[in-house]
Image (cartoon, grey):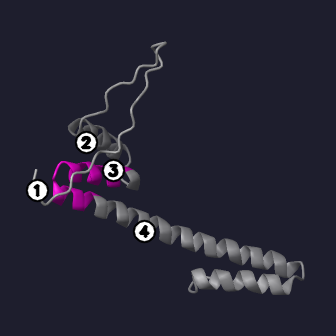
């Protein structure tokens, strides 16, 4: 491994077998085996941003920087897309709350919620 690349210990949880009464721990996956397992997850759900990021971390641990960059960037793109979707929904929820409060003649509280909605998504409220 290149001396300029810091070593990262993989964040692998040790599995415990429930078949043995002693509850002995199994060995963690090798980095190569973990890559195989994560790729299986991503075949089923390519938009799994956590799996994309984890794959990038494993590639980084192996010194495969181009692959690490690609997967972490993909994870960020997916997560940013989800954040944008959530912001749109959250703005609508605050606007709905404002409408309910206005209907209850709680105008000051309603205005606070409408302002909050506008601060989150001024184009769609």
- For the residues marked 3 and 4, what is the alpha-carbon distance in whole angstroms? 17 Å
Element carrying mark 4:
helix
The circle on residue 3 is: 1
Q: Choose between 14 and 87: the one closer to the eye.
A: 14
Left or right: 25, with 103 as reference point:
left
Mark found first going from the N terminus, 1 or 3:
1
Mark in front: 1 vs 2? 1
The image's mark for residue 80 is 4
User: Could you classify mark 2 by the number of other residues whose Cα lies within 10 Å: few (under 14), some (14-19), or many (20 or more)?
Assistant: some
Residue 29 sits in quarter: top left
**Where does label 3 land, which residue?**
54
The magenta segment: 51-71
Specify the quadrant that holds the C terminus. bottom right
Q: Which label sits on residue 35?
A: 2
Residue 101 appears in the figure: yes
Considering only order in the chain, which callout, 2 or 4, is on the residue closer to the N terminus? 2
For disc 4, the neighbor class at 10 Å (few under 14, some 14 to 19, many from 20) is: few
- Residue furthest to the top: 21
Compute the Cα span from label 1 to label 3: 22 Å
The reply to whether callout 1 and callout 2 are in contact (CB within 8 Å) is: no
Q: Is residue 93 left or right of residue 78?
A: right
Q: CA distance from mark 4 to mark 2?
A: 24 Å
On residue 84, the disc is: none
Residue located at (23% from left, 57% from top)? 68
Residue 58 colored in magenta in the image: yes
- The structure residue drawn at horizontal position 39% and vertical position 37%, both measured from the top left corner, is 13
Kindly state the secondary structure of the residue where label 3 is placed.
Answer: helix
Please state which of the two labelled residues, at mark 1 or mark 4, is closer to the viewer.
1
- Residue 46 in picture, x, y percent from top left: 35, 51
By secondary structure, the bulk of the magenta-drawn segment is best described as helix
């Amino acid at each position: 491994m290149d001396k300029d690349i810091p070593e990262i210990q993989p964040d692998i949880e040790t599995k415990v077998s429930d078949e043995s009464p002693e509850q002995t721990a199994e060995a963690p996956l090798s980095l190569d085996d973990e890559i195989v397992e994560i790729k299986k997850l991503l075949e089923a759900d390519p938009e799994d941003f956590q799996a994309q990021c984890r794959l990038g971390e494993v590639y980084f641990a192996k010194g495969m920087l181009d692959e690490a960059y690609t997967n972490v960037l993909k994870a960020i793109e997916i997560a940013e897309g989800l954040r944008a979707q959530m912001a749109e929904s959250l703005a609508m929820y605050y606007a709905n709350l404002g409408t309910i409060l206005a209907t209850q003649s709680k105008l000051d509280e309603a205005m606070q919620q409408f302002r909050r909605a506008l601060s989150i998504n001024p184009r769609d409220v």
